[in-house]
Image: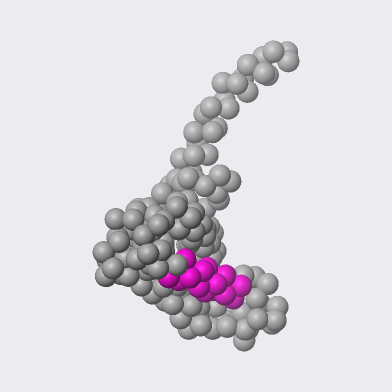
Amino acid sequence: MMHKISYLLRLRLPFLLCLHLLITVSGIDQWCYKTPHPDPCKRYFINRNGFRPPTQLSDFRVMLVEAAMHRAISARNELASSSLNCTDGQKQAVLADCIDLYGDTIMQLNRTLKCMSPKASSGKQYCTDFDAQTWLSTALTNTETCRHGTTDFNVSDFITPIVSKTEISNLMSNSNRQRSPLDHRHG
């Protein structure tokens, strides 16, 4: 009897795993297609372990900001690692500026997440949707300033691949476009 149960479980397990993957993928598709940049959104979430599709817009918006935060930290760390091997003065200067800009981006995204989190509704942190939009716009401006600086100083071949592969600008644009009032929790 035990062998039959074990055999049936082994047959059904691959089916259940495939079914779970299909539900998860289709679950994020419906949310990501509501953003200006659905492909980076889908790529990010489909590659996350333990990912669960959101159930409401406010959850999705938090997930988008968390995704941008994860990518910003990754980009800043990679830029910092690259600066250790850089001997060109102009590239070092641009790298230092980009590292600072990404540090500020992380701070702005963190402010936004603190404001958006359920703990913020306890009244200890007050912010409006306008505040969150401002912080997200500032974070996006920081990353764009880094990108433009690399072009202005003709060092884009060195820094742009690091910054581009994170798709952070697209993820932040997606976050900024998802309107979910934050201040209703404080009223």
Which residue is rendered at x = 52% and y = 29% of the image?
15
Residue 8 occupies which quadrant of the picture? Answer: top right
Quadrant where the N terminus sits is top right
Question: Which color scheme did the rendering employ for the protein?
Answer: one colour
Percent x, y of residue 165 = 37, 53
* Residue 73 counted in the magenta span: no
Which residue is rendered at x = 58% and y = 27% of the image?
13
Q: Which residues are magenta?
A: 97-115
The residue lying furthest to the right in this view is 2
Q: Depth check: give the residue in front, 63 or 148.
A: 148
Which residue is rendered at x = 37% and y = 64% of the image?
89
Residue 119 visible to the viewer: yes
Q: Depth check: give the residue in front, 163 or 64.
A: 163
Q: Depth check: give the residue in front, 68 or 63.
A: 68
Q: What secondary structure predominates along the stretch shown in magenta?
A: helix
Residue 143 occupies which quadrant of the picture? Answer: bottom left
Which residue is rendered at x = 48% and y = 45% of the image?
47
Residue 178 visible to the viewer: no
Percent x, y of residue 44 = 45, 51
The correct choice, above or below, for 107 with respect to 164 in the image is below
Percent x, y of residue 25 = 45, 45
* Residue 99 counted in the magenta span: yes
Percent x, y of residue 187 = 62, 86
